[in-house]
Amino acid sequence: MKSIKIKYIIILLIIYYSSTVRSDGLDDPLFKPLTAEYVLHSFELIALRNEYSPSRHFPLRKWNKPVRIFMDSRAGDSKIQSMLLEENIKLLSEITQLDIKTINAKKKANVFVVFELDRRMKKVVGEYVNRPEKLYSILEEGVCTAHFQVNRRSQIIRAVIFIPPDKARRFAKLPACVLEELTQILGLPNDSDEVFPSIFNDSSIDDELSTLDVVLLKILYDKRLTAGLLRDKVIPIASRIFQELKQACQKASTRQFPKKKQICYLIR
């Protein structure tokens, strides 16, 4: 039993580092200084716009209730998939303070993470989404995708993530797919080449949350920002939140915080 566990840990580490270790020799982007102007512009692009309607501003979208995730594994190694899922759920829950957990009861879930072979994914998409045609082309062009639904108040009420493990492994993107799609269904749905470094930039070489990504999540899940707020109200509030984060970090000693666990370690 112990040897089997070690085997899975080794496999997971190989998969993880194949996609997250930087090979370009650049400095770690987690420590890149951020300006208020750049953060607010990034927040507007990623939180208030949509990949399919880039010129339109949407109301702020976010969860206001516990997130319960059901893993529907139909292909690939379910133990590795579960480990990746739990690891990233813990990370995102710490950052946002959202109540996020996996459950075994599919009927009680409001988020579904589906792992299925690339050639069979279209059929599965149709099981979870009413009008799946748009997602077909996205899956053909990309590696993985997600879809979420909101109510009339722009509160996210349901989400589905589709990951073909064979295609994701082929591009060394399995860990990145899990993290990126989980992050996007929290209310940061857009991708943009203007946001860098970030997992929301398809051209970025990074497969982990950057400092910017963490800050965007912290801003989104501040209680002063509620689902349904429009851009004119969102940006001034987001600006105050970011300034407060920076001021708090300037007063605190970075030695007081564990690395990569507290926002004060990331914001300089």
Image (tube, grey):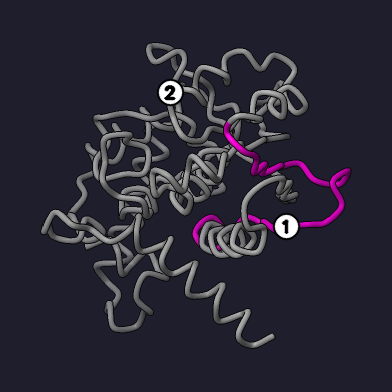
Q: Nearer the viewer, residue 135 or 150?
A: 135
In the displayed structure, 175 sits above or below 228; it is: below
Q: Nearer the viewer, residue 206 or 92?
A: 206
Callout 1: 10 Å neighbours few (<14), some, many (20+)?
some
Spatial CA distance of label 1 from label 2 is: 29 Å
Residue 248 screen position, x and y as percent: 33, 65
In the displayed structure, 162 sits above or below 71; it is: above
Residue 261 screen position, x and y as percent: 42, 70
Q: Which residue is mark 2?
A: 141
Residue 207 screen position, x and y as percent: 36, 51
Callout 2: 10 Å neighbours few (<14), some, many (20+)?
few
Q: Name the secondary structure under disc 1.
A: strand
Q: Amino acid at mark 1?
A: Thr
Give me the residue at 49% from left, 23% from top: 140
In this image, 226 relative to 171: left or right? right
Q: Are marks 1 and 2 in contact (CB under 8 Å)?
A: no
In this image, 238 relative to 255: left or right? right
Question: Sequence-wise, which precedes: disc 1 or disc 2?
Answer: 1
* Tag of residue 102: 1
Quadrant for the C terminus in the image = bottom left
Q: Is residue 239 magenta?
A: no
Residue 101 screen position, x and y as percent: 70, 59
Give me the residue at 87% from left, 52% from top: 105
